[in-house]
Image: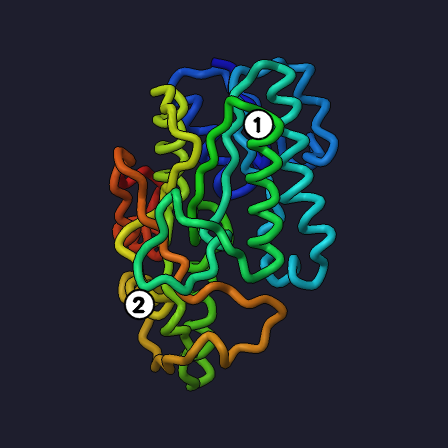
Amino acid sequence: MRVAITGAAGQLGRQLVVAFEADGHEVRGFSHDDLDITKPAALFDWDPDVVVNSAAWTDVDGCARDPERAMRINGEGAGAVSAVAAACNAMIVQVSTNEVFDGTLDRPYHEDDDPDPINAYGRSKLAGEIAVVAANPRHLIVRTAWLFGPGGTNFVTKILAAATHAADAGQPLRLVSDEIGNPTWTPDLAAAIVSLVTQDDRRNVVHVAGVPAVSRLAWAQVALEAAGIRVDVDPVALATFERASTPPLRAVLAPSAGVAEMDWRPASVECARGLPAKPTA
């Protein structure tokens, strides 16, 4: 297949290019410099069979400060990419987020649970889902959460840097203990998306996320132990941090049936130790 990937310079986009090429497909990655997803006509020039839209504005606090821009990129942009894919008779794969849910359930969210986002980022991503579905009957929405991957800044690298700074200053490291989610290693997610597309899966919405669900605090502790960083930890509530956005406290995704189990812990250890990237599933 000819596979076009938007957001190809991002931590997921890079892994999607690798995964589809490894599976024998002809791939063209479009970075932001190559393609503005709000004006995606350049996709016509390549005539793809599949378009994977991993481009998004993922700065949750930035989205809260500028919800119109968030909606333009994550909502309208996703719909525009889907419409061009439809005109090429191509399947559209839209990467979405756990933040389309409000995080109030005491169980993981399934594909048929009603979305109810509580912040601008979640609202813009839900608008993107709706626009993608309206524009292209051949669509697959892939909801995921808490992405981290090799070769860039992510939660693990940020925590290790913060812990080193705190230890050097003789101060405790403050870690959120009540926000629960699914850390997801981008090589695993990319491999799962390739599998879903190439198997011609008939589902329209799929949850693909790491297991088990974990707090930010517990995730950080796995990384700190792997990196051998010793620092005092101060568990705190999410509400104690002043920020523009309000993340859902427990927007845990239930991975869809048939999706390979993706344990985030080995990948977190690899990431913390700076080991080469590889799928863990």
The C terminus sits in image quarter: top left
At horizontal 68% and vertical 43% (from top left) the residue drawn is 73
At horizontal 35% and vertical 42% (from top left) the residue drawn is 276
The circle drawn on residue 43 is none
Q: Is residue 70 left or right of residue 263?
A: right
The picture places residue 162, in percent across and down from the top left corner, at 46, 71
Whether tag 2 and tag 1 are in contact, CB under 8 A, the answer is no
Q: Is residue 80 left or right of residue 165?
A: right
The picture places residue 93, in percent across and down from the top left corner, at 50, 30
At horizontal 37% and vertical 46% (from top left) the residue drawn is 185
Q: Is residue 117 left or right of residue 63?
A: left
Give amino acid for label 2: Ala
At horizontal 37% and vertical 80% (from top left) the residue drawn is 235
- Can you identify the residue that label 2 sits on? 218
The circle drawn on residue 29 is 1
**Residue 51 versus residue 27: which sits nearer the camera?**
51
The picture places residue 215, in percent across and down from the top left corner, at 34, 66
Mark 1, secondary structure of its residue = strand
> Is 155 located above or below residue 82 in the figure?
below
Quadrant housing residue 201: top left
Mark 2, secondary structure of its residue = helix
